[in-house]
Image (spheres, rainbow, N blue to C red):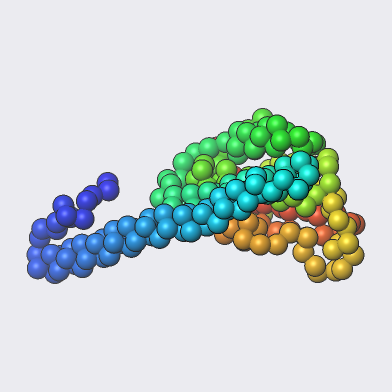
Amino acid sequence: EPVDVADFRVRGPREVRLLGDRLAEALGRIETQRRERDLMLAGLSHDLRTPLMRLMLRIDLQDAIPEEERAALNADVGELDRRIDRFIEHARTGAEEPMIALDLVSLLRAGIAASRERGHRWQVELPDHARLRGQPGVLARLLANLLDNAEQHGAQPFRIALDQRPAVGPVGATWCLRLDNQLADSGSADKPGTPAHRGFGLALCRHIALAHGGSLENGCANAGYWVELRLPAAEV
């Protein structure tokens, strides 16, 4: 069970007490690093959001900007604000959220419903349930990033399918989630090896997949873009 650093005590032979002292020192360093991380993230949020708010104020004060352009600029600023919040939340909670039994389909349906509310069309093929062990908040952010990638770079309708792949050798059964969409600007697809989606979002998704014992691959084909996420299925 978690124990406060100040209450961590080990009794027994001298060798065991020495080991306990070293563990107590390590716990103290971890706690100090956690506090420093939280302070850094609070400062990061302030430093990033302050210029965003100044930018939004300047947009509102400019009378010469057409209303459609003003709405698009405000939407971009709002999207940047949400991405900052998503990154900071992951950095703060990603290592601390427990691994629990969960249903990947429930997380997917919630993310797709939110995307549809934003006006996006999805073709969906999902099973009734997809049981696995993972961090629900972290996986929800992974899925949100993948859906956001499709919205930002793809042409509707977007396609998403989830199915279970059987065990192969030492590798157990996996859930395979695939997203496909045509590129909004297919020019990048004409250049082999040129990724359509870049940036921290996709790298974060791959990191989360690896941390859950899975994998994430992506690529371009036939003027389209695909992402394939694999996560270990829970044993029934």
Q: Is residue 99 visible?
A: yes
Q: Is residue 170 visible?
A: no
Residue 40: image location, x then y, percent: 40, 60
Residue 181: image location, x then y, percent: 82, 48
Q: Residue at x 63, y 51 (%)?
A: 58
Q: Hey, which quadrant is residue 131 in on the image?
A: top right
Q: Nearer the viewer, residue 47 or 232?
A: 47
Residue 94: image location, x then y, percent: 47, 52
Q: Is residue 152 above or below residue 116?
A: below
Q: Is residue 127 above or below residue 170?
A: above
| Residue that sits furthest to the front in the current view | 63
Give the total of numbered labels. Answer: 0
Q: Residue at x 80, y 67 (%)?
A: 194
Q: Nearer the viewer, residue 186 or 76?
A: 76
Q: Residue at x 48, y 54 (%)?
A: 45
Q: Quadrant of the C terminus?
A: top right
Residue 66: image location, x then y, percent: 78, 44
Q: Residue at x 77, y 37 (%)?
A: 120
Residue 145 shown left or right of residue 15 in the figure = right
Residue 15 shown left or right of residue 184 in the figure = left
Q: Nearer the viewer, residue 210 or 164?
A: 210
